[in-house]
Image (cartoon, helix red, strand yellow):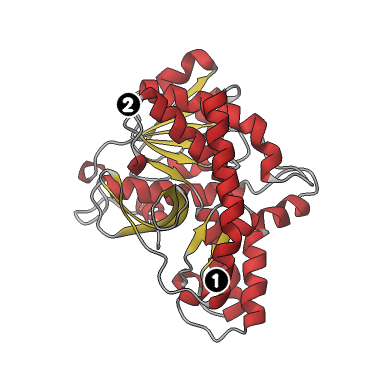
């Protein structure tokens, strides 16, 4: 689950030599960010502008996008940037997109659960996915809008109704859970965080987030008490940030970073880079639930393979059974919303 996003960014600063990065060596790719003027959308737009795999960057929101687009367009990197604003320009933003990233929606506030966001964000996601089905039905879709456990099933239902659903191209972005698990594990185990891998499975909210620290590398001799504390902190990472910002925001910067890592992995997969593996919330048969986060091998068509859970500790087996009812409820809630509205 390593990412070369930062290495990709560093190539932009290299002198032009025969061995340096060449834009001619990779395909042209259009990436569209829906919700680009928001708290996640702005830093995410910056990071995607820095990615040399992006040739066109389309930024869309209901307002404020021209300013964001003008700002990031001054950065001396490969992609051409265009800003789009309002319903009448949504189609222009989406046409020809290879990857669509959706951070649109309202953020969490103190005391808010992800379910509290549901009614507002579900409607936003449904509307945007209806437009995706019309203007770029073959694009890879990266869903960031919370609650991801429900918004991904909503998107699936919208795409099914439009007759364009491809389960290989719809992803719930759970990378932030992996980023947090790696960071917290490295701190406790006193190892180099750049070398850490921790799979995180399940969903993307509270108890449905299940980091598999028994599979973490490099191995560390942590106590069961440490593992439980790390698990709880990973599950509560979003709340930790919301409370620290004291009503003035949620996890926007770290989420943008995580979203950029996953989008980079999708682009590499599209471009034929071998053995690109990340955790993501996708349509799955590895449990009895229709959607589940696990390691996924990415390729030219999106999902090449949904990888199994691997060996679990007793604590993780218990956590897996504990998360299933809540995740099942969230999935059903999303499907019901999509069918009724």
**Element class at badge 2:** loop
The residue carrying mark 2 is: 96
**Which label is found at residue 316?**
1
- Which residue is located at x 64 percent, y 60 percent? 235
**Cα distance, mark 1 to mark 2?**
42 Å
Q: Residues within 10 Å of mark 1 (few under 14, many from 20)?
A: some
Which of the two marks, 1 or 2, is nearer to us in this view?
1
- Which residue is located at x 38 percent, y 20 percent? 134
**Which label is found at residue 198?**
none
Point out residue 161 in the picture as x, y percentages from the top left corner.
41, 25
Q: Quadrant of the C terminus?
A: top right
Image position of 223 with respect to 46: above or below: below
Q: Quadrant of the N terminus?
A: bottom left
| Sequence-earlier tag: 1 or 2 | 2
Left-right relation of 79 to 23: right
Image position of 18 with respect to 214: above or below: above
**Element class at badge 1:** helix
Please identify the residue farthest to the left as the structure is shown: 18
Point out residue 66 in the picture as x, y percentages from the top left corner.
54, 23
Point out residue 298 in the picture as x, y percentages from the top left corner.
32, 52
Q: Is residue 81 in view?
A: no
Q: Are marks 1 and 2 in contact (CB under 8 Å)?
A: no
Quarter-of-image position of residue 10: bottom left
Total count of labels: 2
Left-right relation of 108 to 227: right
Left-right relation of 277 to 230: left
């Amino acid at each position: 689950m390593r990412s070369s996003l930062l290495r990709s960014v560093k190539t932009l600063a290299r002198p032009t030599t025969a061995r340096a990065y060449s834009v001619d060596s990779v395909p042209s790719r259009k990436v569209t960010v829906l919700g680009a003027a928001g708290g996640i959308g702005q830093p995410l737009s910056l990071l995607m502008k820095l990615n040399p795999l992006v040739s066109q960057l389309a930024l869309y929101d209901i307002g404020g996008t021209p300013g964001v687009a003008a700002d990031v367009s001054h950065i001396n990197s490969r992609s051409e940037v265009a800003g789009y604003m309002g319903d009448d320009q949504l189609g222009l933003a989406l046409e020809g997109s290879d990857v669509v990233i959706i951070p649109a929606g309202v953020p969490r506030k103190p005391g808010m659960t992800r379910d509290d966001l549901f009614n507002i964000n579900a409607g936003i996601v449904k509307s945007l996915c209806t437009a995706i089905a019309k203007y770029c039905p073959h694009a890879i879709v990266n869903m960031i809008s919370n609650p991801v456990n429900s918004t991904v099933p909503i998107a699936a239902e919208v795409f099914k109704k439009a007759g364009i659903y491809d389960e290989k191209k719809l992803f719930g972005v759970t990378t932030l859970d992996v980023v947090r698990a790696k960071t917290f594990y490295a701190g406790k185990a006193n190892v180099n965080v750049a070398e850490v891998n921790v799979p995180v499975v399940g969903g993307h909210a509270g108890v449905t987030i299940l980091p598999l620290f028994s599979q973490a590398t490099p191995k560390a001799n942590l106590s069961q008490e440490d593992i439980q504390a790390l698990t709880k902190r990973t599950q509560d990472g979003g709340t930790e940030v919301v409370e620290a910002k004291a009503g003035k925001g949620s996890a926007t910067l770290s989420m943008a970073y995580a979203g950029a890592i996953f989008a980079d992995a999708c682009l590499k997969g599209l471009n034929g880079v071998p053995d690109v593996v990340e955790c993501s919330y996708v349509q799955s048969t590895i449990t009895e639930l229709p959607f589940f986060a696990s390691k996924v091998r990415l390729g030219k068509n999106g999902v090449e393979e949904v990888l199994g859970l691997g060996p679990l500790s007793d604590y993780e087996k218990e956590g897996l059974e504990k998360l299933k009812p809540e995740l099942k409820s969230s999935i059903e809630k999303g499907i019901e919303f999509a069918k009724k509205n």
